[in-house]
Structure formats: C-alpha cells, structure tokens
Amino acid sequence: MKQAILTVLGKDRPGIISKVTGELYRLGCNLEDVSMTILEGEFAMIVVLSHTQKTFSQVQKAVQKAVGAWKLTVAGKDLKGTLTRGEKHLAGSKAFLISVVGKDQTGI
C-alpha cells in the first residue's frame, strides 16, 4: 500500500469526521494516524493513511468532492518510504512535557 498525509481545514460543523472517514473507507484507505482539533471555531484534521489508489490525487479529489458543499480545504501529499510512527527519530531521546502558564503576550 502507498502512504500519504491528508489535511482537512475549515469552519467546524457536525459531520466532517464522518464524511471524511466514510469517503476514505469507501476508497479502501486505512487510517494509520490521526490528529484533530478545533481552534477558534475552525476544524483541523491531519490523517496519515495507506491507500491502494493509482495516485494520491484520486484520494484527495474524492474527499474534496465529499465535503465540497462545506467549503473545506483538502490538501495532502504522498509519503515516501515506510511509516515508522517516529521510532527512528525518537531512538535514544527522552520524552518531556512542558507547560507554560502566564499572561498572553507576543513572543511566548
């Protein structure tokens, strides 16, 4: 299978996740990793997926068509190589959690 990363951005509304993942399922894609958030009423979704389509462009166009009425931005690209879930980059490193609390100001 080929790997790709897909982003979906736009005004938050009910049903976005269902539409996007339903279309990916219909295309035979497998979700490898997903991140979603809502910031200031804007929805952002990043999906790493595996697919068997001839080109990733076909996946991107199908998802764009599925959510087209909602005026969402759909973009992405092929990923080269095998998915590693970060193992190569994390070998020998330590995990940290950093929290910052304070008055909001430019440059934090």
Image (spheres, rainbow, N blue to C red):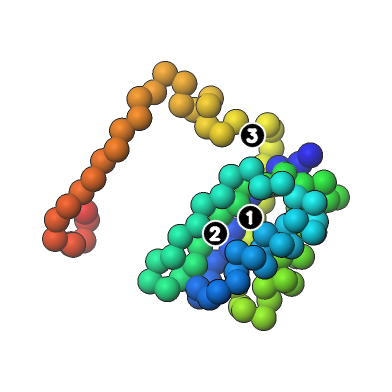
Instruction: Say few, some or many: other residues with alpha carbon within 10 Å of mark 2 (under 14 / 14 to 19 / 20 or more).
Output: some
Q: Position of residue 85 (x, y in %)?
A: 56, 34
Q: Can I make out residue 72 in this image?
A: yes
- Circle 2/circle 1 CB separation < 8 Å: yes
Above/below status of 93 relative to 82:
above
What mark, if any, has residue 6 been given in the picture? 1
Q: Which mark is residue 45?
A: 2
The residue carrying mark 3 is 83
Q: CA distance from mark 1 to mark 3?
A: 15 Å
Q: Position of residue 78 (x, y in %)?
A: 69, 47
Q: Residue at x 14, y 60 (%)?
A: 103
For marks 2 and 1 on the same chain, the one whose residue lies earlier in the sequence: 1
Mark 3 → mark 2, Cα distance in angstroms: 19 Å
Residue type, mark 3 in image: Leu
Q: Marks 2 and 1, how far apart in space?
A: 8 Å
Q: Position of residue 57 (x, y in %)?
A: 76, 57
Among the two numbered marks 3 and 2 on one chain, the one whose residue lies closer to the N terminus: 2
